[in-house]
Amino acid sequence: MTTNQSSARLVKSKQRVADHGEVFTPNWMVDNMLDLVKAESERIDSRVLEPACGSGNFLVPVLRRKLATVEARYGKSDFERRHQALLALMCIYGIELLADNTVECRESLIEVFTGYLNAKPSDDWHRAAERVLAANIIQGDALSMTTAEGEPIVFPEWGYLGRGRFQRRDFRYDNLTQRASFQGTLWDHLEESEIFTPTKEFPAMTVEEIAS
Ligand SMILES: C[S@@+](CC[C@H](N)C(=O)[O-])C[C@H]1O[C@@H](n2cnc3c(N)ncnc32)[C@H](O)[C@@H]1O
């Protein structure tokens, strides 16, 4: 914790603590926890999901760590640096029950991302990041695995194909959570693609296409 991170920032109201268990994790504890998985937290394309992400107290530092890796590896090429930074953002996922926290989480992530790229709101990079976060940070219930509208939660799996092009395939979250339950069973030998089929596949997209 920065020693001045006040308890007011960790708790919004007693009612919300009682209703939703809403107590945010202090920065120092987040950093210590992320250090336990340091390499993964810093890897650009490690996929990180926080199923009760609040306003992003874990996801924002994860993005910062990934962007530090981007800068160290790709800082010399503006083209690669930008695309790798977007890939870093694409690998961050969250589910949050409350609308205001969901919005705050998206806004905090976009602030860090656009700050790193110095992207203005009218910029394709800014708009692409908004599109990514609208798909990756979901307002919903992580237990029932449904959105606020009662639909099954769907997450995009993004990948960077190189030369400025990204791929996207969407998967149902309830399906993905069954992945571990196949281990050690009769279906263990099957390729993941034989068990998990995307709900939607997109053609390769440029940043401009993601933004539009
Ligand atoms: C203890 S707080 C932790 C927030 C954040 N992970 C952090 O460490 O700062 C728990 C969060 O989970 C949210 N939450 C509670 N039940 C949930 C559910 N079923 N699905 C998704 N989010 C939920 C609350 O609104 C709250 O923001």
Image (cartoon, rainbow, N blue to C red):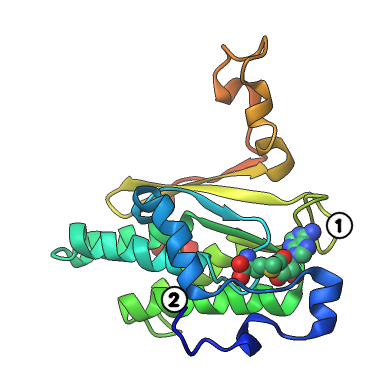
Left or right of 142? Residue 55 is: left
Q: Residue furthest left?
A: 76
Residue on which the image places disc 1: 150
**How far across and down, in percent of the image, does residue 103 sit?**
65, 77
The answer, for residue 11, to whether it is visible in the render is yes
Q: Is residue 110 above or below residue 158?
A: below
Q: Position of residue 54 (x, y in %)?
A: 65, 70
Secondary-structure class at tag 1: loop
Q: Quadrant of ligand 1?
A: bottom right
156 or 112, nearer to the observer? 112
The residue labelled by disc 2 is 126
Amino acid at circle 2:
His
Residue at figure coordinates x 24%, y 59% from the top left: 80
The residue closer to the viewer here, 205 or 5, is 5
Left or right? Give the position of 136 relative to 45. right
Label 1 sits on what residue type? Gly
Mark nearer the viewer, 2 or 1? 1
Q: Do the residues bearing badges 2 and 1 touch, measured as CB atoms within 8 Å?
A: no
Q: 72 left or right of 124?
A: left
